[in-house]
């Protein structure tokens, strides 16, 4: 059996030892329901609140502004549902958002909203001017992600929030791909809402949170209980919440080391590649890299690479079944977006892995180019 090399950390990461160790007692020893008012339940509740404080501290928020969710998609759905209660009828959304944002925009359209789409420039950046042109006095919400999941572009979210606020719109940012590489401060950005997903930064899958600025009112997501201030009913996943608290603190502590390492890995990988045109934008994180291999369909190449021992992807795992190339690339005007493959590096990736991965890519591309 082949030992696969994994270069798909933007799809998901393993749970770190520290996060796992922190979560373990809450499966068996301290298994109590955090909503129980008795002394044992309060042990679980205290752990949840400690984790909430860690999540808040990692993004410069206050603990009462953090609402736990089942991950990024849920946080996005919740944030965008805010527009329904605003009394306004427009939203502005960048065209390079994750499918969760774009699908929520379509859902708003079906109930009468007008969607103003904001395109990126050739560098994959949503400019403040583009947002200013798209946002009107009637815009409830402007949505632009912090880091793009296909090419890693870092958006100027502080300036974008200011542009949205000028016209009275709220600003929501999907920061799901940002936590490992960027220092996030919601007060500095002046974001009204921000979404985070644990499994992108070495916490378990199925856990995340939505930051909601004090004073911004969001509608209830799930009815039937008093959890999360009565806005998201349902017993909390204490082990995952505890793990996420540890993981986000660790991500913040290790950020410089992480980004240096990702730059080194990405450079070594590119250096060893004989084929392909990397999409290297001016402002990007080092851990996400899309490469266009002209003449070879990206989906076909990703399958061939997997068979040869390298796991990477064409775009986001959520749209892996789709035959269309990543929208981000076509929106940026990249030529042959259908020939792109995404490689993403993580804290477990080694230099020898990226060199071996590049050798697999070289061999596979050469073989597919020769028609074999
Ligand atoms: N937003 C971005 C930018 C993502 O990359 C992803 C996951 O790939 C999501 C949202 C969805 O997050 P989750 O998998 O936690 O639902």
Image (spheres, rainbow, N blue to C red):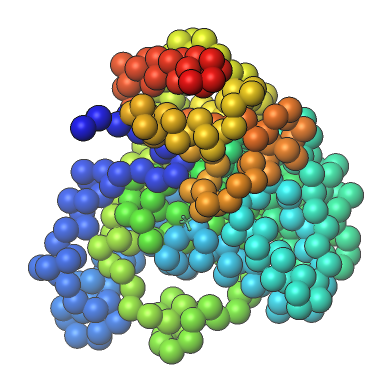
Name which residue lies at 80% across and 62% down: 115
Taking 309 as reference, is 280 left or right?
A: right
Name which residue lies at 25% across and 84% down: 36
Q: Do we see residue 346 in this rendering?
A: no
Residue sitting at the far bottom? 224
Q: Is residue 74 above or below residue 344?
A: below
Could you say where residue 27 lies in the image, as x and y percent from the top left?
17, 66
Q: Looking at the picture, tell me which residue is in the foreground, 284 or 211.
A: 284
Q: Do we see residue 315 in this rendering?
A: yes
Residue 369: name its quadrant: top right
Residue 69: name its quadrant: bottom left
Q: Looking at the picture, tell me which residue is in the foreground, 351 or 63.
A: 351
Q: Is residue 191 above or below residue 371?
A: below
Q: Looking at the picture, tell me which residue is in the foreground, 101 or 23.
A: 101
Could you say where residue 133 lies in the image, as x and y percent from the top left?
89, 49
Q: Is residue 158 above or below residue 44?
A: above
Could you say where residue 222 lies in the image, as x and y percent from the top left?
49, 81
Name which residue lies at 51% across and 66% down: 74
Q: Is residue 241 above or below residue 189?
A: below
Q: Looking at the picture, tell me which residue is in the foreground, 23 or 277.
A: 277
Taking 85 as reference, is 213 left or right?
A: left
Name which residue lies at 45% across and 54% down: 197
Position of the N terminus by quadrant: top left
């Amino acid at each position: 059996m082949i030992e696969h090399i994994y270069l798909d950390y933007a799809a998901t990461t393993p749970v770190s030892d520290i996060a796992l160790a922190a979560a373990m007692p809450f499966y068996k020893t301290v298994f109590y329901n955090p909503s129980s008012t008795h002394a044992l339940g309060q042990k679980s509740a205290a752990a949840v609140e400690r984790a909430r404080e860690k999540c808040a501290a990692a993004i410069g928020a206050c603990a009462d502004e953090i609402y736990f969710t089942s991950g990024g998609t849920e946080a996005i759905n919740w944030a965008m549902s805010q527009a329904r209660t605003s009394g306004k009828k427009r939203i502005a959304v960048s065209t390079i958002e994750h499918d969760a944002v774009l699908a929520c925009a379509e859902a708003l359209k079906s109930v009468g909203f007008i969607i103003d789409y904001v395109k990126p420039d050739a560098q994959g950046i949503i400019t403040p001017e583009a947002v200013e042109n798209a946002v009107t006095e009637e815009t409830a919400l402007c949505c632009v992600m912090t880091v793009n999941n296909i090419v890693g572009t870092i958006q100027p979210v502080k300036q974008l929030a200011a542009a949205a606020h000028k016209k009275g719109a709220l600003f929501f940012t999907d920061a799901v791909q940002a936590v490992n590489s960027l220092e996030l401060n919601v007060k500095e950005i002046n974001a009204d809402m921000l979404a985070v997903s644990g499994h992108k930064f070495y916490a378990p899958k199925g856990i995340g949170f939505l930051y909601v600025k004090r004073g911004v009112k969001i509608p209830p997501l799930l009815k039937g209980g008093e959890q999360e201030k009565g806005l998201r009913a349902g017993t909390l996943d204490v082990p995952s919440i505890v793990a996420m608290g540890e993981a986000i603190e660790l991500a913040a502590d290790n950020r410089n080391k992480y980004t240096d390492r990702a730059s080194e890995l990405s450079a070594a990988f590119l250096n060893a590649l004989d084929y392909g045109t990397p999409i290297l934008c001016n402002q990007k994180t080092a851990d996400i890299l899309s490469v266009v291999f002209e003449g070879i369909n990206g989906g076909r190449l990703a399958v061939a690479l997997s068979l040869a021992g390298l796991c990477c992807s064409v775009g986001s795992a959520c749209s892996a079944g789709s035959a269309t190339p990543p929208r981000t690339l076509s929106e940026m005007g990249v030529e042959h977006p259908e020939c792109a493959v995404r490689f993403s590096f993580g804290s477990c990736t080694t230099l020898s892995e990226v060199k071996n991965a590049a050798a697999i890519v070289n061999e596979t591309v050469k073989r597919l180019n020769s028609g074999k």
